[in-house]
Image (cartoon, coloured by chain):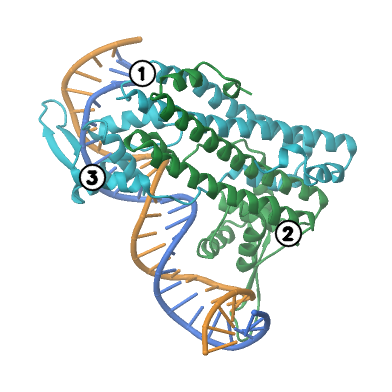
Chain colours: A green, B cyan, C blue, D orange
Amino acid sequence: MSLKHALLGILTVKPMTGYELKQFFDSSVQHFWNAELSQIYPTLKTLEEQGWVDKSVEVQDSRPNKKIYALTDGGRDEFARWVRQPMPATDMRDPFMIKVFFGAELPIEDMLILLRRQMEEEQKILAFSETVLREKIRGGSHALHSPRQGLFWTLTLEMANAYRRAYIEWCDRSMHLLEESMLEGGATAIEKRLSDGEPELRVV
Amino acid sequence: MSLKHALLGILTVKPMTGYELKQFFDSSVQHFWNAELSQIYPTLKTLEEQGWVDKSVEVQDSRPNKKIYALTDGGRDEFARWVRQPMPATDMRDPFMIKVFFGAELPIEDMLILLRRQMEEEQKILAFSETVLREKIRGGSHALHSPRQGLFWTLTLEMANAYRRAYIEWCDRSMHLLEESMLEGGATAIEKRLSDGEPELRVV
DNA sequence: TTACCCATGTAACCCGTTACATGATTTT
DNA sequence: AAAATCATGTAACGGGTTACATGGGTAA
């Protein structure tokens, strides 16, 4: 479970309530991670049981009491241990690729429509992070507690954007290839070009 | 659940047992999807209950009987419907990015080690699909039942590779940036360059 | 003789989302 | 008057992985 460690990580910034942790997620890492309150609250409880966070209660009237969670030394150690530990590469899991894989089951025109739609979805998301999110970082949001952290935040944003860009380019290229295959009346020529090692196919 | 539809898709090729479906996964789509037998068997049962597949039994001695599943007309329709239906863009969910996001919590040297390891993991996977998988497609594996299908298979492979390449490039670039920040003694200059819109940052 | 292939499954558990429940305060 | 914010949670369900259970046949 990475959520545990994501929470520990956020708590290195400062002690927070579950509600505030959710806000932190939404305002800073939502481009590569997300969590619902219904998942955060129980996780905080297990974190407390493991001794990685301490809970203190701030009494409120006319509202549920605030439960503020702070990292313990053990929690800080656990996070440091986890961060350093290498992990296997994330494997891709994209249901859209199932549709593409069985693309031969439908007319090329329909496949082109699918690809265009998917590309537009990706473009919307990319446009969002190119503008709104970048501004947030540049403006130095509350989530930042040091300039160095801003650099790492930017790197994660860059990764998300690199992914979207690769996706969009792939959609574009696939659409062109399919259009060509309609004109040429067969997939053989394209297949040959793809597997013969065009520049795009080299290992970086 | 996309597994249901992935199974329906595979069964368009020919009727198969659960065991054979697993082999199909392993030999053709494992670069973007996977499924365990313990998940496939119950799913086949629900598929049968929904009337999307028909089961026939091939009796065997000294081995559990084979249960061969074949698409019904309803199943074929359902798959065709599902394929055409647009879907929201998959959101990225990468625990490694949590580590990067909190990279300021550890010495830059340690972060560089992490990035290098992660890059090497990605390179291994990329090298694998650049060789083994490509050969499989070129050689026309048993999973292929038409040349056109080979084209779409290739496209999914290209997507997976594009993703890995983007990841590797990002690791490389991030490492360079961090090294620079060590020399310059501060992250400000780099941050400025990142957010001022270098060529790499344009929307494609 | 060790290990992998064939061939079926069940059970427990983990992670995550959606829906449900409560209810005052503030903004539009 | 309606909607969003603050603040806590529980319950049900969906999807996936790991472990467990069985057991003959075949290749290293």
Question: Tag 2, which secondary structure?
Answer: loop
Above/below status of A65 relative to A28: below
> Which residue: 62% across, 60% down?
A26
Q: Mark 1–mark 3 contact, CB under 8 Å?
A: no
Please state if A72 lies on the left or on the right of A89 as rendered.
Answer: right
User: Closer to the camera, A183 or B129?
Assistant: A183
Residue A143's mark? 2
Residue annotated with mark 1: B140
Residue B156 seen = no
Please state if A33 lies on the left or on the right of A14 as rendered.
Answer: left
Q: Amino acid at mark 2?
A: Ala
Give the x, y percent position of residue B131.
Answer: 50, 18
Above/below status of A62 relative to A23: below
Give the x, y percent position of residue B39.
Answer: 32, 42
Q: Badge 2: few (under 14), some or many (20 or more) residues near its Cα, within 10 Å? A: some
Which label lies toward us, 3 or 2?
3
Label 1 vs label 3: CA separation?
A: 27 Å
Q: Badge 1: few (under 14), some or many (20 or more) residues near its Cα, within 10 Å? A: some
> Which residue: 50% across, 38% down?
A92
